[in-house]
Image: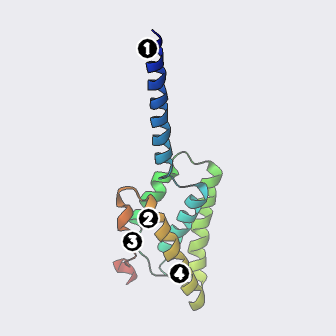
C-alpha cells in the first residue's frame, strides 16, 4: 500500500511538472502588454502610404492572436499607438519618414515571432497600390 502511495504521488508530481512546462512554453508565444502595444505601432507604420505600405498579414495575425483576454486599458493603449503612428507617418517630412521607416522595420521584425503559422513569412514587400 505504501508503494502505491509513492507511485501515485510521483505520478502527480510528474503530471504537475509537465503541465507547468507546457504552460511556460505556451506563455513564450504570447506577447507581453508592452510587445502588444509595440506591435500595434508597427501595424500603424506598416499600413502607412506615406512610408510605403507593406504586407501586414503576419502582423495582423499576431495582433489578433495576442488580443484575446487583454485588459481594456492595454487594448486602448495599442489603438492609440497605432493611430499615433499613422498620424506621425502622414505628417512626417523626409527625415521623419526615414526615421519612421527604420523604426517600422525594427518593430515589425520583432513582431514576426508572434505571427502564428505565418511567423516566418512576414514580408516587407510593398503592396501593389503603394508602388
Q: CA distance from mark 1 to mark 3?
A: 59 Å
Do labels 4 and 3 touch, CB within 8 Å? no
Q: CA distance from mark 3 to mark 2?
A: 12 Å
Closer to the eye: label 4 or 3: 4
Which numbered disc, 2 or 4, marks the residue that appears first in the sequence? 4
Q: Which residue is mark 2?
A: 112
Q: Position of residue 16 (x, y in %)?
A: 49, 31
Compared to 131, does 45 lie above or below? above
Instruction: Sort mark 1 into few (<14), some (14-19) or many (20+) by Cα contacts within 10 Å.
Output: few
Q: Nearer the viewer, residue 28 or 111?
A: 28
Q: Is residue 93 visible?
A: no
Q: Residue at x 45, y 58 (%)?
A: 114
Q: CA distance from mark 2 to mark 1?
A: 49 Å
Closer to the eye: label 1 or 4: 1
Q: Which residue is mark 4?
A: 102
Instruction: Sort mark 4 into few (<14), some (14-19) or many (20+) by Cα contacts within 10 Å.
Output: few
Closer to the eye: label 1 or 3: 1
Q: Nearer the viewer, residue 109 or 44?
A: 109
Amino acid at each position: 500500500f505504501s508503494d502505491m502511495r509513492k507511485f501515485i504521488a510521483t505520478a502527480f508530481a510528474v503530471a504537475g511538472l509537465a503541465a507547468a512546462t507546457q504552460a511556460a512554453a505556451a506563455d513564450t508565444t504570447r506577447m507581453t502588454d508592452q510587445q502588444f502595444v509595440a506591435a500595434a505601432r508597427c501595424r500603424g507604420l506598416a499600413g502607412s502610404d506615406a512610408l510605403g505600405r507593406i504586407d501586414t498579414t503576419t502582423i495582423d495575425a499576431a495582433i489578433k492572436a495576442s488580443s484575446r483576454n487583454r485588459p481594456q486599458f492595454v487594448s486602448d493603449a495599442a489603438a492609440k499607438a497605432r493611430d499615433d503612428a499613422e498620424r506621425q507617418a502622414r505628417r512626417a517630412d523626409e527625415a521623419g519618414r526615414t526615421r519612421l521607416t527604420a523604426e517600422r522595420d525594427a518593430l515589425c521584425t520583432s513582431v514576426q515571432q508572434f505571427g502564428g503559422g505565418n511567423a516566418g513569412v512576414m514580408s516587407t514587400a510593398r503592396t501593389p497600390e503603394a508602388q
